[in-house]
């Protein structure tokens, strides 16, 4: 991979790697975000696509970045590549639905790459939970989660039944379980769903009984998911894991939660 990246980053890298790779085939590329049209550490994505011989590109979301903003579409069309840009306001309901899904994915991605501080100030994404979180804040979040569950408004996500799982009989205690958890595939689509719901709700409940029978394993798996998404495990009860991650800007006011709880 490093060798390919070195070639790609060099002068003429896009041509070296992709020139006419698909010239003899009728290839359509489906991309969530409009391909970039500017040079950074690597050549423009749009350049790689037209050099490869792709005949058609379907774009789910136009990049609002001023450095792109339609430039990727124009670059492709100027090199005789057919481009279809999905619209969130379309007479085709299916197109609108897919375009909105792509927009949500891009928005979540933009938040993930936004520079973060360690103190949670100015609405920045909290990174260092060890310094930010404490027992009182976790207790306030747990109380809120209990209230939302009683109201039926707590967002809950179940480990997909179709995803891989761990048979407790096949793992040893301690090290064997940890190794099995670390090797368990995390379904990308499901992780995207968890991620987008964390941005929207900030606090969600994961039900992991489909993944592993051991309660200790559910805790380990919850911690792994939290690490992947830069979230915080607020509570583990049985096979359920309560995750928390502040949004940009924050949705939940923890200080107010603390004040309300103290009254």
Image (cartoon, grey):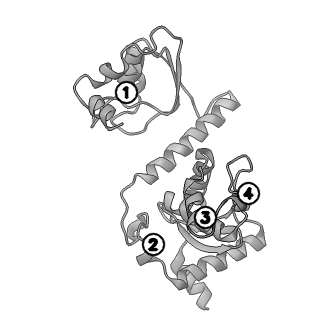
* Real-space CA distance between mark 3 and mark 1, rounded to the nearest whole angstrom: 50 Å
In this orientation, which residue lies closer to the viewer: 221 or 93? Answer: 221
What residue is rendered at 30% in x and 34% in y?
Answer: 3
Q: Which tag, 2 or 4, sits closer to the chain's start?
A: 2
Q: Which residue position is annotated with label 4?
A: 210
Q: Which tag, 4 or 1, sits closer to the chain's start?
A: 1
Can residue 62 be seen here? The reply is yes
- Marks counted in the figure total 4
Q: Residues within 10 Å of mark 3 (few under 14, many from 20)?
A: some
Depicted 241 relative to depicted 192: above or below: below
**Image mark for residue 71:** 1
Q: Secondary structure at mark 3?
A: helix
Q: Residues within 10 Å of mark 1 (few under 14, many from 20)?
A: many
* Real-space CA distance between mark 2 and mark 1, rounded to the nearest whole angstrom: 39 Å
Q: Secondary structure at mark 2?
A: helix
Q: Which residue position is annotated with label 3?
A: 177
In this orientation, which residue lies closer to the viewer: 41 or 64? Answer: 41
Disc 2, disc 4: CB below 8 Å? no
* Real-space CA distance between mark 3 and mark 2, rounded to the nearest whole angstrom: 25 Å
Question: Could you tell me residue 104's position as x and y percent?
Answer: 56, 45
Q: Nearer the viewer, mark 3 or mark 2?
A: 3
Q: Nearer the viewer, mark 4 or mark 1?
A: 4
Can residue 202 be seen here? The reply is no
Depicted 154 relative to depicted 185: above or below: below
* Real-space CA distance between mark 2 and mark 4, rounded to the nearest whole angstrom: 28 Å
Q: Residues within 10 Å of mark 4 (few under 14, many from 20)?
A: some
Q: Which residue position is annotated with label 2?
A: 129
Quadrant of the snapshot with the N terminus: top left
* Real-space CA distance between mark 4 and mark 1, rounded to the nearest whole angstrom: 45 Å
Q: Nearer the viewer, mark 3 or mark 4?
A: 3
């Amino acid at each position: 991979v490093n060798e390919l990246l070195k070639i790609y980053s060099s002068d003429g890298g896009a041509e070296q790697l992709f020139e006419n790779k698909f010239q003899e085939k009728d290839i359509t590329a489906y991309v969530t975000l409009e391909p970039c049209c500017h040079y950074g550490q690597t050549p423009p994505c749009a350049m790689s696509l037209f050099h490869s011989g792709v005949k058609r590109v379907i774009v789910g979301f136009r990049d609002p970045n001023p450095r792109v903003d339609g430039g990727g579409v124009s670059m492709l069309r100027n090199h005789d590549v057919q481009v279809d840009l999905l619209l969130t306001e379309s007479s085709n309901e299916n197109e609108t639905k897919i375009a909105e899904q792509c927009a949500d994915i891009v928005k979540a991605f933009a938040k993930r790459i936004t520079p973060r501080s360690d103190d949670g100030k100015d609405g920045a994404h909290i990174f260092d939970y060890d310094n930010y979180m404490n027992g009182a804040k976790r207790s306030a979040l747990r109380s809120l989660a209990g209230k939302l569950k009683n109201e039926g408004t707590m967002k809950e996500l179940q480990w997909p039944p179709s995803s891989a799982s761990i048979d407790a009989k096949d793992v040893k205690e301690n090290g064997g379980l940890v190794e099995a958890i670390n090797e368990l595939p995390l379904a990308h689509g499901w992780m995207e769903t968890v991620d987008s719901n964390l941005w929207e709700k900030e606090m969600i409940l994961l039900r992991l009984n489909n993944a592993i029978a051991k309660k200790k394993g559910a805790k380990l798996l919850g911690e792994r998911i939290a690490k992947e998404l830069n979230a915080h495990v607020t509570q583990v009860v049985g096979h359920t894991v309560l995750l928390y991650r502040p949004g940009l800007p924050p949705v939940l006011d923890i200080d107010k939660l603390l004040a309300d709880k103290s009254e």
